[in-house]
Amino acid sequence: MKAITIQNLSKTYANGTRALTEVNIEVEAGDFFALLGANGAGKTTIIGILTGLVNKTAGKAVIYGHNIDREFEAAKRMMGVVPQEFNFNMFEKIQDILITQAGYYGIERSAALTEAESLLKRLGLWEKRNHPARSLSGGMKRRLMIARALVHRPQLLILDEPTAGVDVELRYGMWDYLKQLNQEGRTILLTTHYLEEVEQLCRHAAMIKEGKIIKHDAVKNLVKMMDRETYVVAVRDMRELSGFEEYNLTVVDSHSFEVELNRTTELDPFLAKLKGSGFVITDIRPKGHRLEKLFLDLLKK
């Protein structure tokens, strides 16, 4: 079943700005899908249309079989949305924010209390449940936004730049939680500037530029399109790297260096040369960010 079907979606604002041009996207139920693009590319406009905040000019959008034009209330119940900006009452108690949100979906208070307790505990906010939202750190506020989006148990979670302003430790913790939600069966649509998130979390991605989809594929296929990779190589005893000038190595520390290679034709010969020169390799790993390089290449085109 399709969680999201977008067909020929277009949006032109009153001032003539064309934000979207015949966008087509399909997201399978249970997928973890990324929408990638620079600021102003059209990502937030797509989310705005799906959630009823922006009126489309043309095209069709369907959420779990519910056309947003004819069955918006049913479609809305299937979605939980985490926008970029904090939009809850900063003076309201954390638990009350979730209870109020549940009420909008007709959930009885007793059931809402049970669900709020579960979510707040899972997101590390239970001890602060009676504190006003303004007392939370930026990362905790972001987690509160996720809890509020999930309190009515939607099948689709939409996250617009969810880790913006979140420190590294909290970001990785949030990744683990999102992976768990996806493994439990929720479909997740993510927009992000942290392309590492896409490689770590998502199975499929669409790249958007100036309101048009320029690439739509499995993340693993997008990564495979990059024929070159930067590797971090760790060795037991670092010494003079003479004879390797052609590889333009970059020393990282006293036991490791970076090298950029063609993954299919250069990696094995390079490792063989290292071993033949007496180096003992203790670890080798891709540095990552291949998707970012691909994204930049596609945008240039």
Image (cartoon, rainbow, N blue to C red):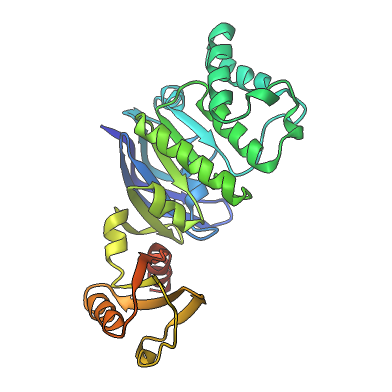
Residue at image location 53% in from the left, 9% down from the top: 111
Q: Nearer the viewer, residue 64 or 123?
A: 123
| Residue 163 location (% of width, % of height) | 56, 47
- Classify 4 as above or below 285: above
Q: Is residue 20 shown left or right of residue 17?
A: left
Residue 52 appearing in the image: no
- Classify 196 as above or below 157: below
Total labels drawn: 0
Q: Nearer the viewer, residue 90 or 69?
A: 90
Residue 290 appearing in the image: yes
Asked which quadrant contains residue 293, the reply is bottom left
Residue at image location 45% in from the left, 45% down from the top: 190
| Quarter of the image that includes the C terminus | bottom left
| Quarter of the image that includes the N terminus | top left
Q: Is residue 14 shown left or right of residue 3?
A: right
Q: Nearer the viewer, residue 254 or 108?
A: 254
| Residue 242 location (% of width, % of height) | 39, 92
Asked which quadrant contains residue 87, the reply is top right
Residue at image location 58% in from the left, 47% down from the top: 169
Residue at image location 45% in from the left, 34% down from the top: 157
| Residue 180 location (% of width, % of height) | 41, 34
| Residue 31 location (% of width, % of height) | 33, 39
